[in-house]
Amino acid sequence: MTSVAECAYCFECLSASLEKRRALSLRQTEELWMKYDASDADEPMEGDDGEDEDDEMEDAVAGEQAESAKPAAISRLLAPSPQSSSSSSLPSTSSSAPEPSSTSEYPLFVTWNTISRSGNKSLRGCIGTFESQELDDGLRNYALTSAFDDARFPPIALRELSSLECGVTLLTDFETAPGPMAWELGKHGLRISFTWHGRRYGATYLPDVPKEQGWTKEETLVSLMRKAGWTGRKDEWQKVGDLQVVRYQGKKASMGYREWREWRDWVDEQGGVDGNVALN
């Protein structure tokens, strides 16, 4: 389900929009991420063969060991592609390629957080949909919508890109809860609706929100009702009429800018010209 490749795709869509360039597709991002991840796994790790420093220096003289001692980016460039004889093109989309997640449809949310220099995380935008989306279009649309159109925040600017973290949550297992408290902290997200003063209100929290905030279940419900627009006394939330709770689960992945940038630089090394990958 949710993978860091989908977060990388959201970063790719946002970066391409801000830089006025063409973005990779989800399929291309997934395949390039797999290739990048595999190349990292193939690289030798220092000290993993049990030899002392002198022996390692002697072995480095040999041609085969010298190849493995090259910097990571050079090793990746020299490594033959498992799908193509040319390192300057994107991986093939033939039937031998792994099946991408972009063939599936899910309700989804894209979250942007700002990470401060001290490591503190603060919300920068979060918008999604409960309607199932084909992932290529859905992730692209909501990566940009949550970045530019969340009314709680100004649009994300290019200068902010390096401070961002992206989270992607794919939603599953929707159930009508038999009661307002019939759900589990850390497992379920909530979608509520209720009638108050003749008007209908509604709001949602993703599964990770209550635990991140340190809330109890009751505090979560009261906060969610406040988010929807309710202004009553917190000890009277149970008196609100027709409170309906739908619980759901979410599979989340996240990625920081640095991780995405390292991958994107590798993509450019494989065939980029002026920062743009040569697209097939």
Image (cartoon, rainbow, N blue to C red):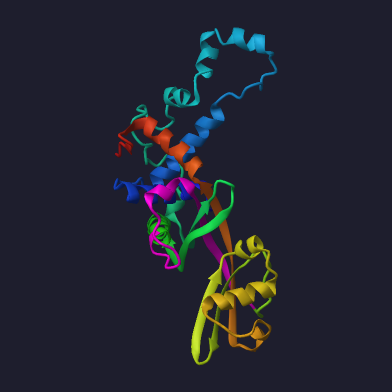
* Residue 117, horizontal then vertical, whole percent: 55, 46
Residues shaded magenta: 148-177
| Picture layout, residue 26 above or below residue 230 | above
Q: Kindly indicate the quadrant of the structure image that contains residue 49.
A: top right
Say which residue appears at 63% left-offset and 77% top-offset. 222
Say which residue appears at 30% left-offset and 34% top-offset. 274
Say which residue appears at 43% left-offset and 48% top-offset. 161
Q: Nearer the viewer, residue 127 or 163?
A: 163
Q: Kindly indicate the quadrant of the structure image that contains residue 269.
A: top left
Q: Quadrant of the image for the C terminus?
A: top left
- Residue 27 on the magenta span: no
**Count of numbered tags:** 0
Q: Nearer the viewer, residue 113 or 52?
A: 113
* Residue 120, horizontal then vertical, whole percent: 59, 52
| Picture layout, residue 27 above or below residue 276 | below
Say which residue appears at 40% left-offset and 48% top-offset. 159
Q: What is the residue that sits farthest to the bottom in this orientation?
A: 198
- Position of 34 with respect to 224 (left or right) is left
| Picture layout, residue 277 above or below residue 115 | above
| Picture layout, residue 202 above or below residue 166 | below
